[in-house]
Image (spheres, helix red, strand yellow):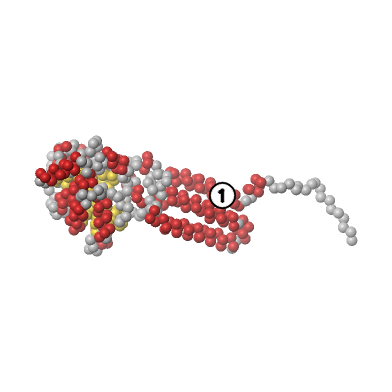
Amino acid sequence: MRLKPTITLGRVDDRPESPSRTLLQSTNFWIILCYSVSYFVIYQYCRYAYSRDPTSFFFDPKKGFQKIYSLKREQQADAFIEVANRSIDAPSSQLNAEVCLGVATIARSKDQYIRRAVGSLLEGLTDAQRASIHLAVFFAQTDPHQHPIYNEPWLKSVANEIVQYNVGDEEMARLHLLEETHQFWNKSMYDYEYLLKACLNTGAQWIMIVEDDVLAKEGWYSEAMRALEDIQLRTDGQVWLYLRLFYTEKLFGWNSEEWLQYLGWSILALLVTATTLVVSRSSSRRLRKHLSNVSIAIICFFCLPATILLYFMAGRVSMQPPPSGLHRMEKFGCCSQGFIFPRQIAPRAMDTVHHATNKRYYVDMTLERWANDEGLARFALIPPLLQHVGSRSSKGSRFDKGANSIWNFEFENYT
């Protein structure tokens, strides 16, 4: 039987498909486009959200070093000192007090931070709390009369003890030489030992040494006492070194010592992602149609590395924030703005500082090296109870840049 030929009306479109249409139908194109848009949005969010994280690529010094809570505490401290200036009642000596609060101070070129330091430490204390503190203000210079606050009325109305050098002529001459030759490392070691000894002589159970350019959080005393009780329970009679009252998060970043750990987690993320995509594709007909080997390679070797990079750029403090509360802090603690020592360890701390007097070490470095050698536990409260506000170093103008960067960013989130 003979078949009749069929006739197709119109002409056949044998033109090749346009490149733009082919591109829009490409799974790989949509993966890259969607990921790029998402990456851009998240990147902009990171610029805003992590601008106060000093470990972040997006850190903005103008926002990070902005005083927020510190302004409130400065105002409260100023009000306290103003009232104290009008007071005529001098506090009695608190021998056998629970806490000896030692504050060493020297005259600075402009701002005298000690007013606000003492004001913030005493403001808000209950009568019972204040009665448990022996406040010793130490003028760490051979001529204390050169300090602008030496004769200010408020000092005598709040300090339980005003500490000055009580040494022989030969020792005083040596201290004067250290001042004249700007041997700040040696002098600071000597002064720290001297103040520790003065506090030991009060018989206090806890010896709290703070620098004169700090601000204390409202309610610091109650939190510190609770932390000390907790430490005593945790250590169960074992000797420990200190409770740290200040640290800076700048040292909490992605440390080079842990690069192998970071690499391991990144490789694990790659393996998990690749395995998940391959298994998912094998179990889904739709994915088998759209998710090619090239698509998986784009996700694993372009999208994932870019995501990991952004994670590290965001900063460790933001991505892995330390939980609030009491923690051991044997690494990356800085600096010596405030410590509380148990009485039983203070004599050994004094000896350690004494033997480092002729070395170019900082106090906190000296204590840390000794604690590492002895295996002494060190603790810190997160967030800290003190903020460092001194923009002018007690060691001289050439140290001012470093002083400006010693800052706790989480402290400003207090309300």
Position of 64 with respect to 357 (left or right) is right
Estimate the x, y position of residue 262 in percent, counting from the top left.
43, 56
The one nearer the camera, 192 or 40, is: 192
Residue where numbered disc 1 is placed: 32
Question: Does residue 354 appear in the picture of this structure?
Answer: yes
Q: Position of residue 372 (x, y in %)?
A: 28, 58
Residue type at mark 1: give it.
Answer: Ile
Residue lying at the far right of the rendered structure: 1
Along the horizontal axis of the image, is 171 left or right of 363? left
> Where the C terminus falls, by quadrant?
top left
> On the picture, is 399 further left or further right than 254?
left
Count neighbours of disc 1 (C-alpha within 10 A) and say few if under 14, some if 14 to 19, many if 20 or more. Answer: some
When asked about the image quadrant of residue 80, the answer is top left
**Seen in the image, is 9 located left or right of residue 72?**
right
Q: Residue at x 23, y 53 (%)?
A: 340
Which residue appears at 31% of the width and 41% of the height?
A: 401
Location of the N terminus by quadrant is bottom right
Q: Do we see residue 346 in this rendering?
A: no
Pick the residue in front: 265 or 23. Answer: 265
Rendered location of residue 5, percent (x, y): 86, 54
Q: Compared to 155, does 25 lie above or below? A: below
Most foreground residue, 335 or 291:
335
Asked which quadrant contains residue 140, the reply is top left
Residue occupying image coordinates x 73% and y 46%: 15
Which element carries disc 1, helix, strand or loop? helix
